[in-house]
Image (cartoon, rainbow, N blue to C red):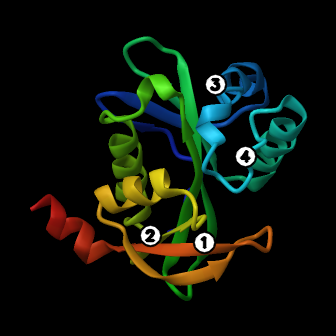
Amino acid sequence: MAFDTQPTLIGDLLQLRPLQSDDYGSLNAVASDPLIWEQHPASDRYQQEVFQKFFQDAMDSGGALIAIDQKTNQVIGSSRYHGYNANASEIEIGWTFLARSHWGGQFNGEMKRLMLQHAFRFVESVLFLIGPENIRSQRAVEKIGGLRDGSRMDASGLESWLYRIRVDEFHESKA
């Protein structure tokens, strides 16, 4: 069975669906908050011309998902699958951001749980690459069970810390 990198995933709090070109305006409105990006290596991503490239890369990736609040039907962020490796039985989840109005609650946890549940139908391991200065994202991944597993160069050539969740650990944490 082939890995579907753009599923529609529905939870109690949010819906994830494939990113579409007409989502640009609403997603840019969320991403235009500089505080979202303050710890991120691309701290200027709130600028429209920088976000435009990020959005186009997301569209071209074939794995981008937009996050929609189930209660308000508003766009609140996005995430994506990347780098599916059937031989290593792994995929990366990354490029995730949420509106600050949805920080500190259950939205990121549900987003990652939905994405992990889907991924573990196809792979044994999910990777997260996080910038060394991005403490907020490191803590968020640790909160969902991610364990630091060294470092790796990301697609842009920056060193990132590698976090991993294995399928057996994920299922044990739900027991």
Residue designated by label 4: 43
Q: Secondary structure at mark 4?
A: loop
Which residue is more in the foreground, 81 or 2? 81
Tag 3 near tag 2, CB within 8 Å:
no
Residue 80 is situated, as x and y percent measured from the top left of the image, at 60, 51
Report the Cα–Cα distance between label 1 and label 2. 10 Å
Residue designated by label 1: 84
Quarter-wise, where is residue 33 in the image? top right
Disc 3 crowd rating (10 Å Cα; few below 14, some 14-19, many 20+) is many
Which residue is more in the foreground, 29 or 121? 29
Residue designated by label 2: 122
Residue 44 vs 152, above or below: the answer is above
Q: Of the residues under marks 1 and 2, which one precedes in the sequence? A: 1
Could one spot residue 26 in this view of the protein?
Answer: yes
Q: Of the residues under marks 3 and 1, which one precedes in the sequence? A: 3
Outermost residue toward the bottom in this view:
87
Nearest to the eye among marks 4 and 3: give it: 4
Q: Of the residues under marks 2 and 4, which one precedes in the sequence? A: 4
